[in-house]
Image (cartoon, rainbow, N blue to C red):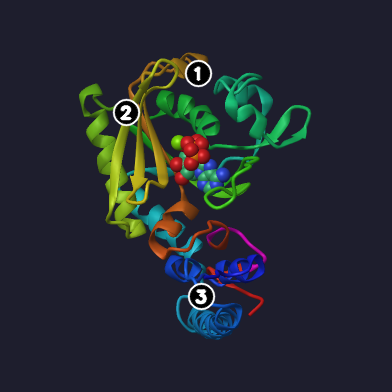
């Protein structure tokens, strides 16, 4: 028995072949090459069909449509959208505890000596929130959706540039925090059209209680946290809070399938999840 060559396998992944197709085995090379041609023809036709549909109907990639639905749902719930810089200062990153010996520190893209491409949205949300807590009556709920950057070594479920949604709500009763995280995650999952997911709780001395949202196949979709939290001290914040960060490409991967995240993100090679060199 033989399976796809590396080049064939890579091309089938690019074209969005199903996992079952990628796992196929053949009696000999001729049968395999014949099957490869058939798959490429079928997947190319499918891709061209999807591109035609994009052009004639919604005209926006799935990533943009998902961002729009999430924005509408959250503003509808009273969350205020914020839009903060993609460049993050070294000082604000340090306030998140990301200094020399933190695992995330190796993953930072430094732009200048004191600026990096943000690996997360949380520091800027903290920054804005500390003023809003002074200006607005509680509870105060805000969110941001935007690009984040991390040096990643592992490919299929990570990309160096991805889109994060981070929402947070400050000043809610302490006993409601866990339930609130689940309710807010349910809202996001409904907008992403994901029905099979679970919550995984962990408690650590450094991060307090964290609640991950995990897809049926074990893929981490989002990470939630709650406060009061050790990091709050750096911002002089004493309120209770909940927050969750989701990767939008992960949400699309969970609904649209495919073994690689890259086709769902910002790309030159793909448009709306379809490889352009077809
Ligand atoms: P993982 O353990 O999967 O690497 P993480 O726990 O390091 O993720 P968080 O810091 O919790 O990631 O970020 C919140 C969410 O952002 C994750 O749950 C995931 O959906 C998404 N995310 C994180 N890193 C990436 C990446 N490199 N590419 C795509 N999405 C990512
Ligand atoms: Mg996480």
x, y percent for residue 244 = 39, 37
Q: Mark number for residue 26? A: 3
The stretch of residues the image draws in magenta is 264-269
Along the horizontal axis of the image, is 76 left or right of 142?
Answer: left
Circle 1 is placed at which residue position? 235
Q: Nearer the viewer, mark 2 or mark 1?
A: 1
Q: Is residue 56 above or below residue 157?
A: below
| Between discs 2 and 1, the one toward the N terminus | 2
Quarter of the image where one finds residue 31? bottom right
Q: Nearer the viewer, mark 3 or mark 1?
A: 3
Rounded to the nearest angstrom, the CA distance separating label 3 from label 2 is 63 Å
Specify few, some or many for label 3: CA neighbours under 10 Å numbering under 14, 14-19, or 20 or more: some
Number of numbered callouts drawn: 3
* Secondary structure of the residue carrying numbered label 2: loop
Q: Residue at x 53, y 61 (%)?
A: 264
Cβ of disc 1 within 8 Å of ligand 1? no
Q: Main secondary structure of the magenta part?
A: loop
Q: Is residue 106 magenta?
A: no
* Secondary structure of the residue carrying numbered label 1: helix
> Can you see residue 70?
yes
Q: Is residue 125 above or below residue 187?
A: above
x, y percent for residue 96 = 54, 23
* Secondary structure of the residue carrying numbered label 3: loop
């Amino acid at each position: 028995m033989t399976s796809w060559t590396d080049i064939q396998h890579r091309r089938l992944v690019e074209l969005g072949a199903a996992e079952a197709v990628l796992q196929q085995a053949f009696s000999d090379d001729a049968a395999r090459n014949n099957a490869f041609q058939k798959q490429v023809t079928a997947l190319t036709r499918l891709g061209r069909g999807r591109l035609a549909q994009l052009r004639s109907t919604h005209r926006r990639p799935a990533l943009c449509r998902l961002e729009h639905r999430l924005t509408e749902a959250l503003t509808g719930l009273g969350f205020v959208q914020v839009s903060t810089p993609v460049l993050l200062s070294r000082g604000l990153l340090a306030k998140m505890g990301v200094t020399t010996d933190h695992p995330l520190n190796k993953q930072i893209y430094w732009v200048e000596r004191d600026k990096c491409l943000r690996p997360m949205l949380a520091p800027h949300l903290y920054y804005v929130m500390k003023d809003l807590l002074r200006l607005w009556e509680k509870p105060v709920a805000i969110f941001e959706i935007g690009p984040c950057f991390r040096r990643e070594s592992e490919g299929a479920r990570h990309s160096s540039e991805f889109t994060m949604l981070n929402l947070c709500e400050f000043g809610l009763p302490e006993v409601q925090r866990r339930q609130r995280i689940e309710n807010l995650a349910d809202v996001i999952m409904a907008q992403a059209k994901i029905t099979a997911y679970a919550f995984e709780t962990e408690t650590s001395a450094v991060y307090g209680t964290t609640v991950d949202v995990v897809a049926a196949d074990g893929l981490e979709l989002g990470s939630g946290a709650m406060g009061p939290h050790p990091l709050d001290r750096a911002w002089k914040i004493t309120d209770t809070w909940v927050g969750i960060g989701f990767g939008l490409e992960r949400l699309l991967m969970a609904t649209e399938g495919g073994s690689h995240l890259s086709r769902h993100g910002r790309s030159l090679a793909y448009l709306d999840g379809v490889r352009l060199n077809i």
